[in-house]
Image (cartoon, rainbow, N blue to C red):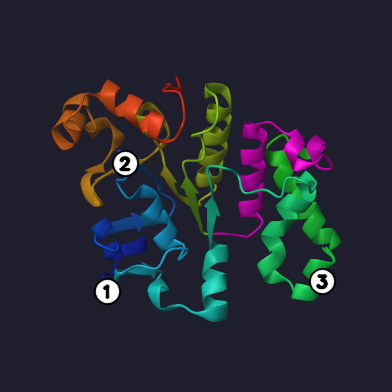
Amino acid sequence: MKTGASMLEIERLTRRFGSKTAVDGVSLSIPAGQMVGVIGRSGAGKSTLLRMINRLTEPSEGRIIFDGQDVTQLKGRALRDWRMRSAMIFQQFNLVQRLDVLTNVLVGRLNQRPMLSSMFKMFTAEERAMALTALDRFDLAEAALQRADTLSGGQQQRVAIARALMQNPRLILADEPIASLDPRNSKIVMDALRDVNRDGLTVLVNLHDLTTARNYCDRIVALNAGRVVFDGPPAELTAARIREVYGVTEEEFAEEAALAVGATPHQLAVA
């Protein structure tokens, strides 16, 4: 096992689905507090990589080490605890649409409560206060009692981020969190992710938009056919480098990536 200051170590991580290798021997060392953007063409393995880190998908080979603990060996309660510490945020929000916003955020506490009390929504006053504080942070406190399905896509994704924070995570894994959003809401959601990153949380975010990755991330990891083809600061991911590793222009990459997630190609002009 590697040693040093890195919080998360991914060692030769591989996932096969039959004869197809979705992730092929990926090794990454991610220091605590870094915001990492993961990019790649359709089928590059981005989602599979994040899902393996959270153990929603089991690796075929390799290891995930978090602060010296082998995550790939965890089972039972220890695995559930890991999923609390490595909170997932999904493209389609994964909210319970018929429930109010506050309850959706409180769902982030379920793994820390006895099942019976959770079933009856017996959350403590302290937990409710925590949830309201999280919503207020993202300018959603006034919507706390609204049904989730009354909110816009951008608002729902901010609720999902607030729910993730209720888990007291040390790592946020965001899988295409802005793919289904318009440019304005994309900016709001990315601002929210950068805000929690500045609080010290490590963030790994899959992105289809190169400009967004450059504007928000400390580091960009590019995958192609399940392998790392670029790993470095955003300034080094030039148009020439995109052509070198993917064989397409930056514009072609953006169009193809957007189509793959059902989005419209857009760029965010963010300082």
**Residue type marked 3:** Ser
For the residues carrying marks 2 and 3, which lies nearer the camera in this image? 3
Earlier in the chain: of badge 1 and badge 2, it is 1
* Quarter of the picture holding the N terminus: bottom left
115 vs 27, nearest the viewer: 115
**Which element is circle 2 on?**
strand
Magenta span covers which residues? Answer: 142-169
Q: Where residue 40 sits in the image (x, y, percent)?
A: 30, 40
Which quadrant holds residue 196?
top right
Residue that numbered label 2 is attached to: 220
Does 145 lie within the magenta span?
Answer: yes
- Which residue lies at the image location 67% right of the left edge and 58% below the top edge? 108
Q: Where residue 164 sits in the image (x, y, percent)?
A: 61, 53
CA gap between label 2 and label 3 equals 42 Å
Residue that numbered label 1 is attached to: 1
Count residues near mark 2 (Cα–Cα under 10 Å), then give few for <14, some for 14-19, many for 20+. many
Residue that numbered label 3 is attached to: 117
